[in-house]
Amino acid sequence: MGLFDNFGKKGNAGDLKSFRYSPGYCDMLGAGHSDSLQKIDDGHWVFVSRNREVHSDPFMVTTYAVDDEAVSRFETFIKERKLISLTKRLDSKDFATDYSPWSYEIVFDCSKAGGSSYENYRISQYKVYSKTDMDLLGEVRDMFYALKGDIISEIAEKD
């Protein structure tokens, strides 16, 4: 039985390990954009933004501090609103070449709940979503971006 089968039942959903959002964008020139929430070795959370506009540029990686209580509220929201259920939507007939579709990637540590060490879920653009689904994704995205605190570091990262 996977995380999805027990999702939302207290004690069975596992702990949030990471959350990543990539906006849809045209990448003919090699642009890249993504933001992630990650737990670092000391147990604290950070928000990491990776951005570049053209392939020849390095990725600019900006790391932000994150309030642990805000992450707890974010995790509770994800679980209570059953965000993972969106992974079960049917495939759409839409497809675009030379375009990176938007996506959300969520990882849970389920070892305490008797599941696999990590359960990975992906919610991506080429599915059939209702208006309610899209509204939920908008709420999640807004809540996610609100997690960014003070800048910890900014570095250029070459491929």
Image (cartoon, rainbow, N blue to C red):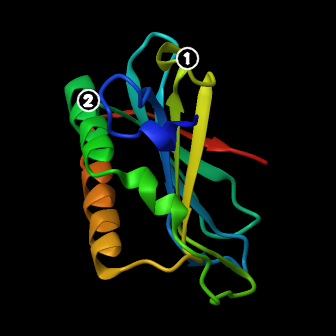
At label 1, the amino acid type is Ser
Give the image location of residue 39, x and y in percent. 46, 24
Mark toward the viewer: 2 or 1: 1
Q: Nearer the viewer, residue 15 or 23?
A: 15
Q: Secondary structure at mark 2?
A: helix
Please give left or right for residue 56 compared with residue 79 in the image.
right
Q: Nearer the viewer, residue 89 or 44?
A: 89
Give the image location of residue 57, x and y in percent. 70, 60
Residue 150 versus residue 4 in the image, above or below: above
Report the residue marked by disc 1.
111
Residue 22 versus residue 84 in the image, above or below: below
Give the image location of residue 154, x and y in percent. 49, 39
Residue 118 versus residue 28 in the image, above or below: above
Q: Residue at x 27, y 24 (%)?
A: 68
At label 2, the amino acid type is Ser
Report the residue marked by disc 2.
72
